[in-house]
Image (cartoon, rainbow, N blue to C red):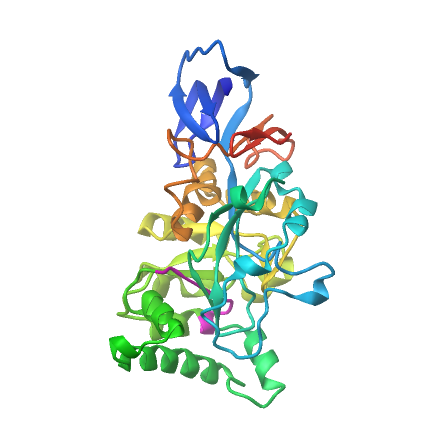
C-alpha cells in the first residue's frame, strides 16, 4: 500500500486538486483527498511536485515492429484487408521495456498495426512497465486500425494489385463495408462481423490513418451518415479542412508534430486545435509518424508544441490522459486519477507541458513503484 502525500494532483480530465493525497492498494486507487492517513502505507512525499495519471499514447508501433525492425510484425501484407488480425500476438514485451517510456510519464500504449493495409487489424492497450504480460494488457481488440495513406499504394501498387491509387483505396474500403452489410446474419464470417461492428453498429472504434487534406476529407465523405466512432490518425493536414471536421464527431490523433517536414509540407496551424476543442471533437497525439514511432521524449514534446500554440495546459493534459483513454474505450480503467481506476501515476518536479525542465521522479504502474 502506498500513500502519495500533498501533491498538486492533475486529475487528467482538466481539473487540478492542490495539496492532495492518493491512497493506493494493490493495483488500484482506493482514495483521493486531503489529509488521508494510513499507518500501514508507505508514504511518498509529493509536496511541491506535480502528480499526473500515467500518460497514454493511443497509436504506437512500439512493441510490434520487432527487433531488429526488419521483422515488422505489425504489418500483415498478405492482403490489403485483414480485420481479423490481433496485434496482441505481435507484441514483444522486451521491445517495449527497452524504450523505458514510463521515464517520460507514458504508462500505456495503444499498440496498432501499421499504415500499410486499408484495414489492418485490431489494437491492444498495453502497459509500458516491465512486469508479467497478463498484468500489462489493459484490454485487447479495443479498436480497428485502417489507413488511406500513401503506404497502402506503395505496398500494393508495386504488385500491380488493388489498391494502386487513392481512388482504389476508397473503393476497396467502401466495397468491403458494402459486402459485409449485404450478407445474411447466419452467413457472416468473423471478418464480416468485425467490419459491421466497426462500420455499421459503432461498437468498435475505428482508428484510420489519413495525412493530407484529400485523405481526411475523402474519409469523412465516405463515412458520412454511418454509425461509426471515428478517430483520424496522423491528420497533419487537419487545419486545412477544419470546417469539414467540425461538421462531424470525428476525433483527431495528431502524429509527431515535432517533425518539421510534416508541419511545413501540410502548412499545419496548431492554433486551430482550439476550434476543435470548442466544437467537442476529442484531440490526442502520439509519437508516431506514418506508422513509425519515435523516441520516448517525443510524446511530451508534442504536448509542449500544442501548449505553445495557445492551448491551455490542462487541455493538453486531457489530450495525454482521458481523451486517448476514451478513444480506446478504456476510460473505465485508465486516463484519470479516480477511485477504482488502475494506479498508474507519474510524479514530476514541474508541469511537463509548460516546462522543459520537468523530470519524472516517481513512476507507478499497476500500483508498483517502477522508479
Residue at (43, 40) in percent of width and height: 334
Q: Which residues are magenta?
A: 204-215
The answer to which image quadrant residue 17 occupies is: top left
Q: Is residue 8 left or right of residue 297?
A: left
Residue at (72, 67) in percent of width and height: 70
The answer to which image quadrant residue 232 occupies is: bottom left
The answer to which image quadrant residue 221 occupies is: bottom left
Q: Is residue 209 visible?
A: no
Outermost residue, right direction? 68
Front residue of 9 and 70: 70
Q: Was residue 210 drawn as part of the magenta stretch in this picture? A: yes
Q: Position of residue 304 (x, y in %)?
A: 56, 42
Q: Is residue 116 visible?
A: yes
Residue at (59, 56) in percent of width and height: 91
The mark tally for this picture is 0
Is the C terminus in the top left, top right, bottom left or bottom right quadrant? top right
Q: Is residue 90 above or below residue 117?
A: above
Q: Position of residue 47 (x, y in %)?
A: 54, 16
Q: Position of residue 217 (x, y in %)?
A: 40, 71
Residue at (62, 54) in percent of width and height: 63
Q: Is residue 227 left or right of residue 283?
A: left
Front residue of 193 and 148: 193
Q: Was residue 37 drawn as part of the magenta stretch in this picture? A: no
Q: Is residue 28 left or right of residue 296?
A: left
Q: Position of residue 108 (x, y in %)?
A: 53, 44
Amino acid at each position: 500500500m502506498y500513500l502519495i502525500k500533498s501533491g498538486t494532483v492533475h486529475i487528467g480530465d482538466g481539473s487540478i486538486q492542490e495539496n492532495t493525497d492518493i491512497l493506493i492498494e494493490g493495483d488500484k486507487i482506493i482514495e483521493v483527498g486531503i489529509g488521508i492517513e494510513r499507518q500501514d502505507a508507505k508514504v511518498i512525499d509529493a509536496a511541491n511536485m506535480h502528480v499526473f495519471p500515467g500518460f497514454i499514447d493511443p497509436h504506437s508501433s512500439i512493441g510490434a515492429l520487432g527487433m531488429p525492425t526488419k521483422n515488422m510484425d505489425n504489418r500483415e501484407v498478405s492482403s490489403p484487408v485483414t480485420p481479423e488480425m490481433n496485434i496482441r500476438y505481435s507484441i514483444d514485451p522486451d521491445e517495449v521495456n527497452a524504450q523505458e517510456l514510463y521515464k517520460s510519464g507514458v504508462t500505456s500504449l495503444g499498440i496498432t498495426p501499421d499504415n500499410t493495409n486499408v484495414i489492418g487489424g485490431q489494437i491492444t492497450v498495453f502497459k509500458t512497465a516491465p512486469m508479467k504480460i497478463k498484468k500489462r494488457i489493459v484490454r485487447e481488440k479495443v479498436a480497428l486500425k485502417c489507413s488511406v495513406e500513401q503506404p497502402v499504394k506503395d505496398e500494393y501498387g508495386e504488385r500491380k494489385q488493388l489498391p494502386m491509387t487513392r481512388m482504389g483505396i476508397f473503393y476497396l474500403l467502401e466495397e468491403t463495408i458494402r459486402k459485409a452489410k449485404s450478407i445474411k446474419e447466419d452467413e457472416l464470417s468473423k471478418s464480416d462481423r468485425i467490419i459491421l461492428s466497426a462500420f455499421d453498429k459503432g461498437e468498435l472504434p475505428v482508428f484510420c490513418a489519413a495525412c493530407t487534406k484529400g485523405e481526411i476529407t475523402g474519409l469523412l465523405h465516405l463515412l458520412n451518415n454511418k454509425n461509426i466512432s471515428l478517430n483520424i490518425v496522423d491528420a497533419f493536414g487537419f487545419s486545412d479542412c477544419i470546417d469539414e471536421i467540425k461538421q462531424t464527431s470525428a476525433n483527431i490523433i495528431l502524429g509527431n508534430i515535432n517533425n518539421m517536414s510534416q508541419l511545413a509540407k501540410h502548412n499545419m496551424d496548431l492554433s486551430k486545435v482550439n476550434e476543435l476543442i470548442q466544437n467537442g471533437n476529442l484531440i490526442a497525439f502520439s509519437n508516431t509518424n506514418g506508422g513509425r514511432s519515435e523516441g520516448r521524449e517525443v510524446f511530451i514534446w508534442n504536448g509542449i508544441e500544442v501548449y505553445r500554440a495557445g492551448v491551455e495546459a490542462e487541455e493538453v493534459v486531457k489530450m495525454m490522459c482521458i481523451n486517448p483513454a476514451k478513444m480506446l474505450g478504456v476510460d473505465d480503467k485508465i486516463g484519470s486519477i479516480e477511485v477504482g481506476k488502475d494506479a498508474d501515476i507519474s510524479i514530476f518536479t514541474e508541469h511537463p507541458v509548460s516546462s522543459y525542465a520537468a523530470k519524472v521522479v516517481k513512476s507507478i504502474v499497476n500500483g508498483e513503484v517502477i522508479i
